[in-house]
Image (cartoon, helix red, strand yellow):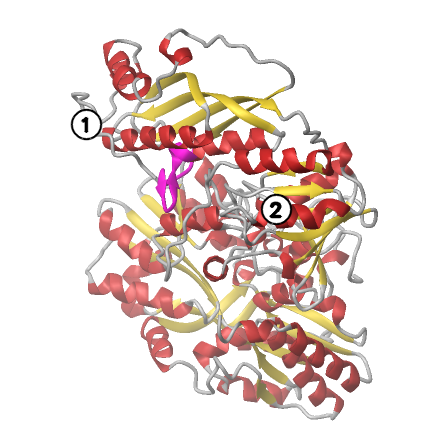
Amino acid sequence: MKYVTEYRSAEIAEKLLAEIKQTVSKSWNIMEVCGGQTHSLVKNGILNMLPKEINMVHGPGCPVCVTPVNLIDKAVYLALNEKVILCSYGDMIRVPGSGMSLLEAKSKGADVRILYSPLEAVKIAKENPDRQVVFFAVGFETTAPANALSVIQAHHEGLKNYAILTSHVLVPPAMEAIMSDVDCRVNAFLGAGHVCAIMGMNEYYPIAEKYKIPIVVTGFEPVDLLEGILMAIKQLESGVYKLENQYKRVVESEGNKNAINTITEVFEVTDREWRGIGEIANSGYGVKEKYRLYDAIKKFDINITGGHEDPTCMSGDIMKGKIKPNACPNFGIKCTPAKPLGAPMVSSEGACAAYYHFHSMANLIEA
Amino acid sequence: MILSCPLPQLDFDVINLGHGSGGTLTSKLLEAGVFKLFENDLLNKKHDGAVFELNGKVAMSTDTYVVSPIFFEGGNIGDLAVNGTINDLAMCGAEAKYLTLAFVLEEGLKMTEFWDILLSIKTASEMAGVQIITGDTKVVERGKGDKIFINTTGIGKVHHKANIDISNIKPGDKIILSGPLARHGIAIMSERQGLKFESNITSDTRPLNDIVLSLLEQFGEAIHFLRDPTRGGLATVLNEIALDAKMGVDISEREIPVDEDVRSACEMLGLDPLYVANEGLFIAIVEASAADELLWTLREWEHNTDASIIGEFTNDHARQVLLKSNIGGRRVVNMLAGEQLPRIC
């Protein structure tokens, strides 16, 4: 696998680690924004290899984790209607709602289908003209182009029975929300590589400038992460703060124009509630008026407000980087992937699941 | 491999409820499809059960197969149902001798599909040298099943040199994995998702009895334990053994064989090969002093050239599986939580 194997090289990783150890002189908190990066750090055992001065703080970049419980309740409500085929990415279906998850709805007879692409949902809509097909469109900027494309495709084919239940969230406003928190202790960010592959880097210059914080757009392989950490440490140790790109083989500064055009054709920026964090202004995408027929919220009469969270779930503090997953008293006891209290224990990108799957309860890492 | 016997004249092109009624349609289906195809002295008696003699230590195992889709690259539910049970017996150190065969068919199953499955069962059982000696056929209404479910129960004699028992495992024992991981699960997933990769990834479903019995003949009690990492994959099986043996397991990511095409597919599908199902693999936990020789012997078999010593048992970190990553970090490998891939076998 060219462009992959070299980023998993033990030899290069070792050199980068040695350089990190040589460079670091004081304690730093570095937040990797994306849940994919969290998983790679834990899965490759990198957290245990870093010098103790470097504290990796796990960010909110798991779309499944931040999808509000109210929206899951709406998805469950739609799924339980026998005229509806509710399609979703796999991760979403085990996330607990106020009453039940989509998986529980499925066991009660709801037609819930796990898909890899929203275009498959369009195909299902075409094949089932007497049913309403709803795709649960969650994700950051990375999944937005495909979700938008599904709307364009359905519109193009004149389908009247396809809609998306959208919960798109955006990375830059979340980074700003974290930095604005008075308790914030983040000294540098590893930017989310795949989000930047779509959107480019321009949105991040003002953040680095305003909060005087280094941001290194970083990939997901072990060598990427170690290099990103090294670049951040070099900035921190020399007192500079700028936007850098470690993930040059994928991320171009202007992003992917076609993808951006597809997004802006269908979506507009709106305020959004983040599960565990609260409402953040201009932090998500909603479907434009032009495509309102494909917006499940507008298309169906769903009278569900609020939502019930387990009050003992600490996912908000975990996603803001205030505590580590294994410092939560419920971790691994009342809350496991098989019976999660909150979304970060479910999603393959959730920090709690990463710690649960790859960490000992008896702690290879200090809480 | 599927035999090319022609479909017998059965008057219907799909299964209907009458085929499970016990009446003439059942009888016709069994005569043409089962008794003729699998004929042997015990089955030919067409009694409610089979009567036979088995002396000495005997192993018995049962499994039900609900895989979806029923046909996939490298096999179908039929050969899976034969190989799966034969392999469970092999993991007990036993050579499967007889199988029972029970079908739950859904009304509407195409007769041609049923016939292809029967032919695969015939081929698989002949290849493994087992006889099907009794069975059952039921039909459920459309929508109450999913084409076909199969149960097989196997019985076989335990090899005289075999002493497979979890209590035999001791610190320092080596863990040998017989071949590359995750082929079966990925073959099913790519079929299910309609994904096509550069090369077709085929299931690894195959009988393990010959290999295992020949290893037992040669290495006897140096083989302390055997398991096939089917559902839940290697990670789940190692965790189960670590728990039961009350010992720790250390494995090295670098030593775990995964074919390049399977690795790419896993990454695309977001799956960890450690948790993906296998159907033609086993792990042998063996005396450290015999491990190298056993590995070289195993590698002489056609499908086991990539066999590898992937780790060992230890007194440290009891009940926990630790993996050394490719870049030298260490992490815990937990048991699969929930179901990564439903209806994989």
Nearest the viewer among A21 and A182 is A21
> Which stretch did the figure color magenta?
B66-79
Residue type pointed to by label 1 = Asp
Look at 71% across and 67% down and name the residue there: B328
Viewer can see residue B14: yes
The chain to which mark 1 is attached is B
Residue A36 image offset from top left, x and y in percent: 57, 66
The chain to which mark 2 is attached is B
Residue A330 image offset from top left, x and y in percent: 73, 49
Viewer can see residue A305: no
Q: Quadrant of residue B232?
A: top right
Residue type pointed to by label 2 = Thr
Sooner in the amino-acid sequence: mark 1 or mark 2: 1
Look at 82% across and 85% down and name the residue there: A25
* Residue B325 belongs to the span the image colors magenta: no
To which residue does mark 1 refer?
Answer: B13
Give the tally of numbered discs.
2
Tell me whether marks 1 and 2 sit on the same chain.
yes
To which residue does mark 2 refer?
Answer: B297
Residue B36 image offset from top left, x and y in percent: 29, 18
Question: Are the residues tagged 1 and 2 within 8 Å (C-beta)?
Answer: no
Nearest the viewer among A133 and B343 is B343
Question: Which numbered disc, 1 or 2, marks the residue closer to the eye?
Answer: 2
Q: Is residue A92 left or right of residue B46?
A: right
Element at badge 2? helix
* Residue B71 belongs to the span the image colors magenta: yes
Element at badge 1? loop
Q: Quadrant of residue A355?
A: bottom right
Look at 61% across and 45% down and name the residue there: B337
